[in-house]
Image (cartoon, rainbow, N blue to C red):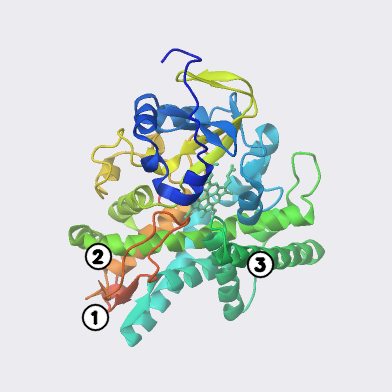
Amino acid sequence: MPFGLARPSRIDHSLLLAREGYLFTAQLADEERRELADTGALTISLLGRQALLVTGDAGVRLFYDEGRVQRRRAVPAPIGLSLFGPGAVHALDDDAHRHRKSMFRDALTQADVERLLEVAERRWRSELESWTEAGSGEVYAAAVDVFGASVIEWAGIREPEEQAREHARWLARIVDGFGVPGPAYVRAAGARRRCDRWASELVRDERAHQSGDPDSWLARVAAFVDHDGNPLPERVAAVELLNILRPTVAAAWLASFATIALVEHPHWRNRIREEAEQASGGAGRIATAFAHEVRRYYPFVPVLAARARRDFRFAGHVVRKGQRVLLDVYGTNHGSEWEDPWSFEPARFLEADPCTITHYVPQGGGPVDSGHRCPGEGVSNGLVALTVSLLACIDGLDLTPQDRHFSMRRRPTRPASGTRVSVGGSPSARGCPVGSQPGS
Ligand code: HEM
């Protein structure tokens, strides 16, 4: 269709997006779905206003083109404030964004990620010991505690184990309810308030006493001088402190899916086990590729939102300044640019460098330093790779009889059963020489 002639649909898509979640694009009218697939773009109507939905490589390039789109006021307040918090890096643009982003990048070097994965491995191993005694365990609940307590320790926050686990569960509650209207959202909002108070106290104490390691995440956030030359206001420092803690706990959702994939694909489980048994440390390239495929294949983020910085045209659509631009994340991870996109196939990541695959966007796309791409991919991929490496080494690991299904409408989703596993035989996990390595 020539420029300017693409017609917005007359149906408001907000309800469809809210109701269908990851199935949003699959539930579009046939004609709309075809247009999105053929051109990579579709003008839709959100809350009575036009928005541009984009997908695939071209859509990713547009979405991360700072000359055309920006993030200010892009995410609806009920989601942005409850998930990221007010003043967070996610909603900044240009120099203010790049400067704040450097705080995250500096704290998440390969060495920092390795240190976090070492802490997580120690805690996972001790958790798995208790599973062996009990004969079973629940992956989701254990991963929340293990990842949460590990990142709290890594961040330089000193607190008793029980308290760290309680804080991990608060963080999980924020993730669990941010996109779900109803009781889960109310629980998430309550957890957000408690986490904000806890994080503010930590920042205040750190500023008053500088008691810990000056390179810890807590110390870095407390001392960070923002783009305007001032320290972050206490509330914003608290928000950013949580912006590493909370998403690290979110990797528990991925660990649940990864366990199911491990059991359902015994060939890969054997390969990961062999790799782990032969390794002298490090989660290895097979476990790492498996983790990438878990992040591509299973649903987590449905869409991302930005706003047009100026008027422009894209794939036959006129986009007006201020109009929302949505990136179809789930659809891009399963689009026609992938070979056999609906097959779970870790081999696709064995040779290719994931950073060079434009349409691989489970945690956003584009450049990580200058754009909004997630700076935590090494952490989440590393935690998933570590998890599957340890689980693959457990003799007789199996899923207990349970409902493995997960909703494609709820965001975020996971098997409601918590992914319970039975542990048979002796756990060679104890002897498995799996160390730690960032995944990407
Ligand atoms: C389940 C795991 C995770 C998922 C699904 C996830 C997903 C995402 C997505 C989709 C974005 C937005 C990208 C964009 O706007 O273009 C993002 C941004 C971000 N993530 Fe993650 N993430 C995860 C884990 C992590 C971890 C482990 C960390 C830190 C250790 C982290 C820290 C951040 C930060 C600070 C941003 C804001 C980046 C910016 O605006 O420049 N995330 N993440």
On screen, residue 132 versus residue 182, left or right, reads left
Residue 420, can we see it? yes
Disc 1 is placed on an element classified as: loop
Q: Check residue 424 in the rendering and tell me which mark sits there, or answer none.
A: 1
Mark 3 — residue? 190
Other-residue count near label 1 (Cα within 10 Å), few / some / many at <14 / 14–19 / ≥20: some
Which of the numbered marks, if any, corresponds to residue 263? 2
The single residue placed furthest to the left in the displayed view is: 267
Q: Where is residue 49 in the image (x, y as percent from the top left)?
A: 60, 33
- Which residue reaches farthest top? 2
What separation in Å lies between label 1 and label 2 (alpha carbons)? Answer: 14 Å
Quadrant of res 190:
bottom right
Horizontal placement of 285 versus 245: left or right? left
Circle 2 or circle 3, nearest the eye: 3
Q: What element carries label 3?
A: helix
Note whether residue 279 is visible. Answer: no
Ligand 1 within 8 Å of the CB at mark 3: no
Question: In the rendered structure, which disc, 2 or 3, sits on the residue that comes first in sequence?
Answer: 3
Depicted 84 relative to depicted 131: above or below: above
